[in-house]
Amino acid sequence: MNRKRAVVKVLEPSKPSAPIAPLVSGILEAIGEDPERQGLQRTPERVEKALRFLTSGYTTDIKKLVNDAIFEVKYDEMVIVKDIEFFSMCEHHMLPFYGRMHIAYIANSRVVGLSKLPRIVDVFARRLQIQERLTQQVAECIQELLDPQGVAVVAEAQHFCMMMRGVEKQQSSTVTSAMLGAFREKKETRDEFLSLIRAGK
């Protein structure tokens, strides 16, 4: 019951808040820059525009995004979309992380238009995130929208907070997964999904 309430809250869009540009000017001054010099005069506005885009997942209405692209069909097999590229920002340092996500669900007489799955990934990726939560939110969203027999999501990503600072390990990657329903309960179903997303690599 608690999980369902959390999913519903995640699907609810929020409203944009106060202007960002004046705050960026303060940051530029705090690091020792002059916001009035030629190269930086429009930087606060550019940063605000970029941040609004990169965090647009907060204000996107997923139900409107999916709209009428859920279809009733006589189908109860696995649907997989592999190698969905995503870009996000970690909530700890606001540095980028990026990678690919693989999504599967076992239909329960309902399917969603294939293009909607990458759009759902973008909604949750365009928020301040940690990879573990991003993976789980995508899975729970699909479960909420389609009520399938199961959902599986695997994300593989590289994190700039590890590549540019801290341990500075440029070749490291992180893999996370979320398994719901049949994928969690049945090893053979989970193994089939994992073998299919590895195929061709």
Image: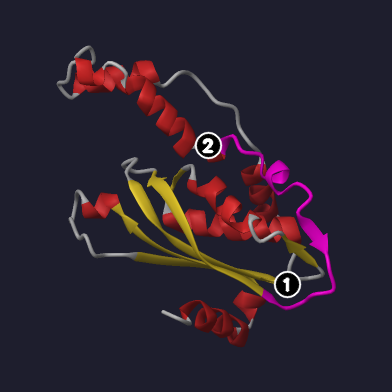
* Relative image position of residue 54 (x, y in whole percent): 45, 38
Residue 66 painted magenta: yes
Asked if the residue at tag 1 contacts the one at tag 2, i.e. Cβ–Cβ closer than 8 Å, the answer is: no
The residue sitting at 56% across, 46% down in the picture is 123
Residue indicated by mark 2: 56
Residue placed furthest toward the left: 32
* Relative image position of residue 155 (x, y in whole percent): 46, 64
The residue sitting at 65% across, 54% down in the picture is 116
Q: Is residue 171 left or right of residue 188?
A: left
The answer to which quarter of the image holds residue 91 is top left
> For this rendering, which residue is in front, 38 or 103?
38
Q: Residues within 10 Å of mark 1 (few under 14, many from 20)?
A: some
Mark 2 element type: helix
The span shown in magenta is 58-78
Mark 1 element type: loop
Residue placed furthest toward the bottom: 188
Tell me how far mark 2 sits from mark 1, CA to CA.
30 Å
The answer to which quarter of the image holds residue 131 is bottom left
Image position of 159 with respect to 176: above or below: above
Quadrant location of the N terminus in the rendered image = bottom right
The residue sitting at 62% across, 45% down in the picture is 10
Residue indicated by mark 1: 149
> For this rendering, which residue is in front, 82 or 125?
82
